[in-house]
Image: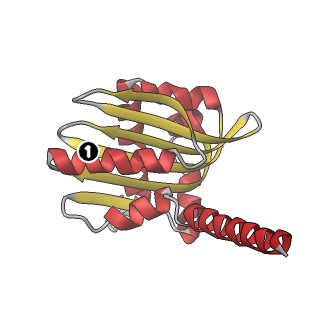
Amino acid sequence: MYFYIDNFYNMKRFGLALLISFLLVSCSSSFQSFYDNHKADMGTTSFQVPNFMKAVLGNISPEVKHAIGNISDFKYIKFEKVDNIKRQNLIAEMSAVTNNGFTDVFRKNEFDNTRIISVRELGVVVTDAIIFNSNPTETTAFYLQGNFDPEKIKMFADEETFNTFSNDLIQNYNTNLNPSFNPEN
């Protein structure tokens, strides 16, 4: 009888451990939850490309397209004028997101600058990339989904390349999102 009771409790513990594991995985951080939690914060600029606007991504400049490849999903969030505590919280949240199935290609943690480039891969192709940059004046994060060359994603470790890419991508997105209503243009 002792054997049956012991097995019963072992199975019960196993079931409880399985349930807790399932809950931890299902409640894990994702870029979408990070984005949703902060898109309405004061001093934040954010956008994501909905399915009906995916064609806009196909019209990005040749330079941007060459830099990254084909994009199927794109989210962007920028925080300005955040205090040091908020900035540290954002960095911690992004670390939690990138620890969930992503591989860091580049991570630089300094007092004045934190840069994270983290990817998910399928074979030799990068399928998801998070590019995060935080300094005392602003914090920005990009989420890109598609098929990317891993070597090109690594280029974003360079601050100048990252800033140029950010400006080009945002400018192209804004241009395609806000067409001119002036008939002469």
Direction from residue 107 to residue 146 in the image, left or right: right
Locate residue 32, reporting x and y percent. 48, 62
Q: In the displayed structure, would residue 168 be above or below residue 77?
A: above
Outermost residue, front direction?
1
Direction from residue 71 to residue 90 in the image, left or right: left
Give the residue at mark 1: 88
Residue 175 lies in quadrant: bottom left
Locate residue 35, reporting x and y percent. 40, 61
Quarter of the picture holding the N terminus = bottom right
Locate residue 44, reporting x and y percent. 25, 58
Q: Residue at x 84, y 69 (%)?
A: 3
Q: In the displayed structure, would residue 86 be above or below residue 54?
A: above
Direction from residue 117 to residue 12 in the image, left or right: right
Amino acid type at mark 1: Gln
Q: Which residue is drawn at 72% across and 71% down?
A: 9
Camera-nearest residue between 34 and 25: 25
Q: Which residue is drawn at 34% across and 68% down?
A: 181
Camera-nearest residue between 95 and 12: 12
Residue 18 lies in quadrant: bottom right
Q: What element carries label 1?
A: helix
Locate residue 43, reporting x and y percent. 19, 58
Camera-nearest residue between 14 and 49: 14
